[in-house]
């Protein structure tokens, strides 16, 4: 059983003194105070943890500076922006492809029919969430639909799937019973089996939430590992010796997915330029293997 928390709030100046006592080099105290007054102590703590030699005493490595920490923070912030733009492209395309392939064959309201669900319990839970998410939508096409129609109690799939969350969309796809239709959607993105798209959708929902909620990407342990097939129809990676729960495999499937939608996208170039602007950031902190720039996907 844990002990009662008794620590009291301290000033920004006191926070600076604690960091200096732990060995962090702070050349410009005034600037450091301004930064900590803008970015909270414990938000930055996730970044300077990488620079600690001991996570119990929180002592810093020799010659580690406050600017190293803020540079990593800045890199991470810009990476989230870059990644969120890529995720937006993928998300919009996935919604479009699922609507395209499933609506024509299974009707406008297949997502409300439990006969198309693998697991009936999950179907009921998903439908309940969909109703809540649609009811919160203020999109014109949703409000106009309800002004005109009263039955069924949800709009058709081509409207509904545009306003549900990525997490809900992921669960809806995973629980759909027709494998052939799911394969057809997966093939649109250069994937041989729907299980890979199911896995990537699940991971993308988590990654999207990290970006949307300004969560740290660097040195993060992701709770869900994406399936990484050794052979793919399109340009892919060859070395699978990376750490599975790091950002690297997440970025790999994003790049592959993005390439299947727009072959002339600039994500890889933009990412390399971002690294070049932040020389103190080591890509190994993101889980990148030493030879990552030689991988076909990243050339």
Image (cartoon, rainbow, N blue to C red):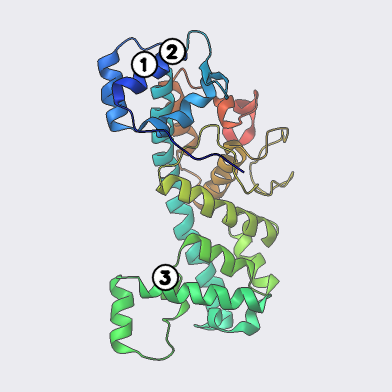
**Mark 1 = which residue?**
17
Q: Secondary structure at mark 2?
A: helix
Q: At 45% from the left edge and 46% from the top edge, which residue is drawn? A: 86
Q: Secondary structure at mark 3?
A: helix
The quarter of the picture where the C terminus appears is top right
Q: CA distance from mark 1 to mark 2?
A: 6 Å
Give the mark nearer the N terminus: 3 vs 2.
2
Q: Secondary structure at mark 1?
A: helix
- The answer to whether residue 112 is above or below residue 234 is below
- State which quadrant residue 187 falls in: bottom right
Q: Nearer the viewer, residue 72 or 21?
A: 21
- The answer to whether residue 181 is above or below residue 11 is below
Where residue 157 sits in the image (x, y, percent)? 47, 77
Q: At 54% from the left edge and 82% from the top edge, which residue is drawn? A: 112
Q: Is residue 253 left or right of residue 138?
A: right
Give the label on residue 21, or none: 2
**Mark 3 = which residue?**
133
Q: Kindly report which numbered mark, 3 or 2, lies closer to the viewer in this rendering.
A: 2
Q: Is residue 35 left or right of residue 265?
A: left
Q: CA distance from mark 3 to mark 2?
A: 49 Å
- The answer to whether residue 49 is above or below residue 91 is above
């Amino acid at each position: 059983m844990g002990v009662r928390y008794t620590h009291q709030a301290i000033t920004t100046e006191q926070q600076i003194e604690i960091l200096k006592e732990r060995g962090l080099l702070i050349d410009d105290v005034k600037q450091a105070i301004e930064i900590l007054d803008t970015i909270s102590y414990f938000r930055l703590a996730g970044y300077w943890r990488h620079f600690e030699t001991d996570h119990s005493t929180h002592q810093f490595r020799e010659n580690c500076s406050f600017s190293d920490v803020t540079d990593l923070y800045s890199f991470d912030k810009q990476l989230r922006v870059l990644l969120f733009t890529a995720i937006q492209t993928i998300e919009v395309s996935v919604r479009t492809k699922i609507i395209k392939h499933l609506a024509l064959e299974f009707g406008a309201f297949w997502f409300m029919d439990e006969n198309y669900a693998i697991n009936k319990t999950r179907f009921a839970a998903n439908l309940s969430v969909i109703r809540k998410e649609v009811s919160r939508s203020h999109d014109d096409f949703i409000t106009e639909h309800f002004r005109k129609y009263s039955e069924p109690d949800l709009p058709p799939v081509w409207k509904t799937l545009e306003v549900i969350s990525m997490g809900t969309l992921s669960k809806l796809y995973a629980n759909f019973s027709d494998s052939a239709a799911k394969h057809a959607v997966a093939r649109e993105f250069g994937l041989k089996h729907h299980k890979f798209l199911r896995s990537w959708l699940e991971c993308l929902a988590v990654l999207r939430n990290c970006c949307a909620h300004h969560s740290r990407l660097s040195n993060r342990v992701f709770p869900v590992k994406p399936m990484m097939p050794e052979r793919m129809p399109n340009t892919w990676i060859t070395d699978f010796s990376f750490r599975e729960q790091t950002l690297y495999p997440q970025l790999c499937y994003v790049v592959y997915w993005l390439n299947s939608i727009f072959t002339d996208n600039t994500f890889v170039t933009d990412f390399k330029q971002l690294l070049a602007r932040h020389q103190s950031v080591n890509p190994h902190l993101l889980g990148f293997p030493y030879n990552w720039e030689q991988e076909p996907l990243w050339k």
